[in-house]
């Protein structure tokens, strides 16, 4: 028998059983479920990543397994327990085998539309922190090493008038580009498989200022060669796995800044460590890692790397919004509601004091190759 898992229960007499593998920010998501006849069980285990067994125990079944990976084992257990809905608390669902979920008649929800600006702001923060050596300088100060102003102390890069490169100019890449252009008057070069009309339209608006220049590059290599700051925002799939590799690092400027707030495996992290060692003026800002939660050997020792623990979506507004959308995805399936028309325009679901629309905010469609490990949140119910 699986070891019992500690839980906190809301509305114990609710008709529908909904389980969350983690406590999520805010209380609105709890109210929305409890007020709609759901018995909500929130896992209170201290572990960050639950094992398959832990989740099976939460579901009410048992099977051997080691990692928190959403595939056939968990979805079939969920089906046996009477569940028909699951929601991730994330926009990306590369950690979920949607095909296995669909095979078991389980809808997969995700939470887009509330992460864009928050994630872009973190990428901008990493760009600045790396360019101006903020973390190194902070450590120096706290170590009591500052004994007076010096002309060479922590000299970094000026952004104004430099070129920002964006690889993957979708929602987050475009928002990041606008921040760097408006905030720091950087010129832009971007590479995407498709033309980013949302970004290009932005430049057509005259704002009376000295114009910055922009262009869509024909190849990713053009961005890597030309840009002073490069931020990665593509989805992770087989076309973007190790997109930054030794050959591509070699063509970047020696004093470039590279930022990654997309997914860890987009960068070959072993090659990156070697590049950081060989090029002390090359700097990097990382929110995500190839073997998350671990860093490749040597990365932690690199002064020219700023590293943060996958906090790009960690603003209060965004995390509370994600929790609300995840709860409403599940509640919507319980109630038999249709799927909302535009998962990127989800404001009506987020109004604190209003009744949310009678719809599931976002249900993911089937995708191939979607079995990566990460921390996720689960909801399901048993009638
Ligand atoms: N670090 C975090 O906490 C965090 C938070 C939110 C999103 N993300 C990640 O950020 C990424 C982007 O999210 P989004 O909402 O902007 O997605 P999006 O779908 O709006 O944009 C992704 C863009 O990448 C482009 N792209 C795909 N393959 C490419 C390739 N080979 N070369 C260049 N461009 C390519 C697509 O055409 C698209 O424009 C996703 O991977 C998502 O998982 C991370």
Image: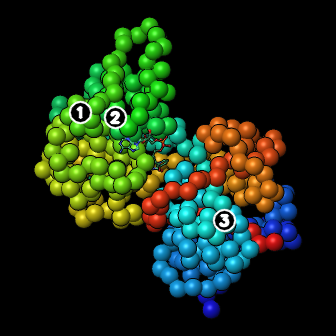
At label 3, counting other C-alpha atoms closer than 10 Å, the crowd grade (few under 14, some 14-19, many 20 or more) is: many
Q: Which residue is mark 1?
A: 222
Judge whether 198 appears above or below 128 on screen: above
Judge whether 150 appears above or below 90 on screen: above
The picture quadrant where one finds residue 57 is bottom right
Instruction: Out of 316 and 112, give the one closest to the viewer.
Output: 112
The picture quadrant where one finds residue 189 is top left
Quarter of the image with the C terminus in it: bottom right
Q: Residue furthest top?
A: 208
Instruction: Out of 69 and 48, give the one closest to the viewer.
Output: 69
Q: Earlier in the sequence, mark 2 or mark 3?
A: 3
Q: Which residue is mark 2?
A: 191
Q: Which residue is mark 3?
A: 106
Q: Are marks 2 and 1 in contact (CB under 8 Å)?
A: yes
Say if residue 205 shows up in the picture.
yes
238 to the left or right of 62: left
């Amino acid at each position: 028998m699986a070891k019992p898992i500690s839980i906190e229960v809301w509305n114990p007499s609710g008709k529908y059983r909904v389980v969350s593998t983690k406590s999520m920010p805010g209380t609105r998501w709890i109210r929305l479920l409890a007020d709609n006849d759901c018995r909500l069980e929130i896992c209170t285990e201290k572990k960050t990543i639950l094992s398959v067994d832990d989740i099976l125990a939460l579901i009410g079944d048992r099977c051997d397994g080691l990692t928190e990976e959403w595939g056939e084992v968990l979805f079939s257990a969920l089906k046996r327990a009477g569940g028909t809905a699951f929601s991730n608390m994330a926009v990306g669902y590369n950690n979920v085998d949607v095909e296995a979920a669909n095979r078991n008649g389980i809808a997969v929800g995700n939470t887009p539309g509330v992460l864009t600006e928050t994630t872009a702001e973190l990428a901008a923060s990493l760009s600045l922190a790396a360019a101006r050596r903020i973390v190194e300088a902070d450590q120096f100060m706290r170590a009591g090493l500052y004994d007076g102003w010096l002309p060479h102390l922590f000299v970094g890069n000026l952004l104004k008038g430099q070129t920002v490169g964006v690889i993957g100019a979708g929602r987050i890449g475009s928002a990041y580009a606008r921040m760097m252009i408006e905030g720091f008057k950087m010129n832009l070069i971007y590479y995407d498989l498709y033309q980013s009309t949302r970004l290009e339209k932005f430049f057509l608006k005259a704002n009376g200022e000295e114009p910055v220049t922009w262009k869509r590059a024909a190849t990713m290599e053009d961005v890597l060669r030309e840009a002073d700051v490069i931020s990665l925002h593509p989805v992770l799939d087989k076309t973007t796995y190790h997109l930054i590799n030794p050959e591509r690092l070699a063509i970047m400027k020696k004093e470039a800044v590279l930022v990654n707030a997309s997914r860890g495996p987009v960068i070959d992290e072993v090659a990156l460590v070697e590049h950081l060692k060989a090029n002390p003026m090359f700097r990097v800002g990382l929110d995500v890692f190839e073997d998350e939660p671990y860093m490749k050997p040597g990365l932690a020792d690199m002064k020219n790397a700023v590293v943060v623990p996958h906090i790009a979506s960690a603003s209060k507004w965004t995390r509370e919004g994600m929790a609300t959308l995840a709860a409403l995805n599940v509640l919507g399936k319980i109630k038999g509601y249709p799927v909302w028309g535009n998962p990127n325009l989800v404001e009506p679901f987020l109004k604190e004091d209003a009744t949310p629309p009678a719809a599931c905010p976002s249900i993911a469609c089937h995708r191939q190759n979607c079995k990566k490990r990460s921390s996720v949140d689960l909801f399901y119910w048993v009638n």
